[in-house]
């Protein structure tokens, strides 16, 4: 059960502070809850002191609110539940979170984003009708642009949310003129990429990258041990993938890894160059949050198809002067061809910088 005692602060929290803690909890379970949303919940007691912090279990398990009120116990009575998504109000694999909150005696519910799913929506109105104070929209943009963005995108479009990962120099180059590219970014940035992989449903590369670099595409901690959650590894392109390619197996002999992960079928080869077909296949597989890690031409193909929903750009403080651009559409462009994104976060990783942006509506 994802109960995060280390996130329980020793001082009273404002609603915004509590929501940021709930976001942190949601980030920790991201990649494990699909097709359910990664939700975080904080319970504040009647004095505003944190009593519990929890995240949603994998599908079939309890939601964040149910776990948080159980962890809080009697301290939930008269207190406040701060949750990243409007509490659900339907019977699925588990009971409605609204009923759990009411039974626990919570006096107030603060949430960030309203539930767009008509089956689960209505929780705020139901609680309000029963005397629970409900406040919606707290840090809504931060949650909607962040941890819940892929799930919200899926609810609206029924297609996967595509995040393009790029890594390059200040002058926008991913490789030198001789093709060499390792290592443009530093250890902290590479470690961050592995954490990011562990929070995705799938990671995509092109067959050219598979044949040239033989990547494993597993998610590993700085010591080399696999993270508990591993993404599906996807290769795109018409070239055949060798049976002994690392992307097929992913793990080394004797590597410490959960047997369920090691034995799972975690590889797909989609033999097409049509990115719209790729997205349709991913949707049929039920994949919601997808990371494109392929080379510049694959990045350019997704961009030209209008399928890039967000970009995570790792920028190293160096200049090459000449080489391969981080994105290559293979066609001539003008300034009018710029695809505009909106910056939603900047993160310093050692000497490198991660710029997170989302596509403009």
Image (tube, rainbow, N blue to C red):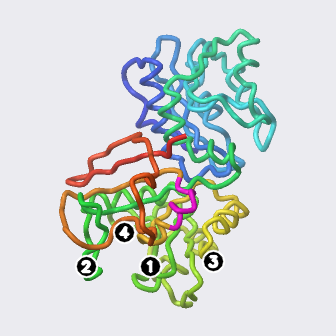
Viewer-closest of 11 and 165: 165
Residue position for label 4? 224
Residues at marks 2 and 4, CA–CA distance in whole angstroms: 31 Å
Mark seen at residue 272 = 3
> Magenta segment range?
301-308
- Residue at x 67% of width, y 23% of height: 101
Counting from the top left corner in percent of width and height, residue 150 is at 58, 47
State the separation of the CA atoms marked 3 and 4: 33 Å
Look at the numbered disc 3 and give the secondary structure of its residue. Answer: loop
- Residue topped by disc 2: 177
Label at residue 209: 1
Query: Which of pointers 3 and 2 lies earlier in the amino acid sequence?
Result: 2
Residue 160 locus on image (x, y percent): 63, 55
Q: Nearer the viewer, residue 335 or 212?
A: 335
In the figure, is residue 289 to the left or right of 182? Answer: right
- Badge 2 local density, few (<14 within 10 Å), some, or many (20+)? few
Q: Secondary structure at mark 4?
A: loop
Q: Which of the pair 251/315 is nearer the observer?
A: 315
Q: Does residue 141 appear left or right of residue 347 in this picture?
A: right
Q: Quadrant of the N terminus?
A: top right
The mark lying in front, picked from 1 and 2, is 2
Locate residue 186: give its quadrant: bottom left
């Amino acid at each position: 059960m994802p109960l995060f005692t280390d996130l329980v602060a020793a001082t009273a929290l404002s609603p915004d502070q509590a929501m940021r803690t709930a976001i942190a909890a949601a980030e920790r379970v991201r990649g494990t809850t699909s097709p359910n949303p990664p939700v975080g919940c904080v319970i504040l007691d009647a004095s505003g002191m944190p009593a519990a912090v929890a995240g949603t279990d994998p599908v079939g398990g309890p939601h964040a609110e149910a776990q948080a009120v159980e962890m809080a116990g009697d301290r939930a009575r008269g207190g406040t539940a701060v949750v990243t998504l409007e509490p659900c109000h339907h019977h699925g694999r588990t009971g409605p979170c609204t009923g759990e909150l009411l039974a626990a005696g919570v006096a107030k519910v603060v949430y960030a984003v309203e539930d767009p799913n008509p089956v689960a929506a209505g929780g705020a109105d139901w609680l309000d009708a029963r005397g629970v104070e409900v406040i919606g929209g707290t840090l809504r943009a931060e949650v909607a642009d962040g941890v819940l963005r892929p799930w919200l995108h899926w609810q609206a479009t029924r297609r996967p949310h595509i995040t393009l990962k790029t890594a390059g120099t200040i002058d926008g180059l991913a490789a030198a003129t001789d093709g060499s590219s390792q290592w443009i970014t530093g250890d902290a940035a590479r470690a961050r990429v592995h954490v990011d992989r562990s929070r995705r449903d799938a990671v995509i590369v092109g067959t050219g990258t598979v044949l040239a670099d033989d990547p494993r595409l597993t998610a590993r901690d700085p010591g080399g041990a696999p993270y508990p959650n591993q993404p599906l590894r996807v290769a795109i392109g018409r070239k055949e993938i060798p049976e002994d390619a690392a992307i097929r197996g992913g793990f080394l002999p004797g590597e410490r890894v959960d047997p369920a992960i090691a034995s799972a079928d975690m590889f797909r080869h989609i033999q097409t160059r049509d990115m719209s077909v790729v997205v349709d296949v991913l949707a049929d597989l039920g994949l919601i949050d997808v990371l494109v890690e392929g080379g510049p031409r694959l990045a350019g193909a997704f961009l030209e198809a209008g399928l890039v929903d967000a970009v995570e750009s790792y920028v190293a403080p160096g200049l090459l002067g000449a080489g391969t651009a981080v994105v290559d559409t293979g066609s001539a462009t003008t300034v009018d061809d710029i695809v505009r994104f909106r910056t939603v976060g900047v993160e310093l990783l050692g000497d490198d910088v991660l710029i997170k942006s989302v596509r403009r509506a």
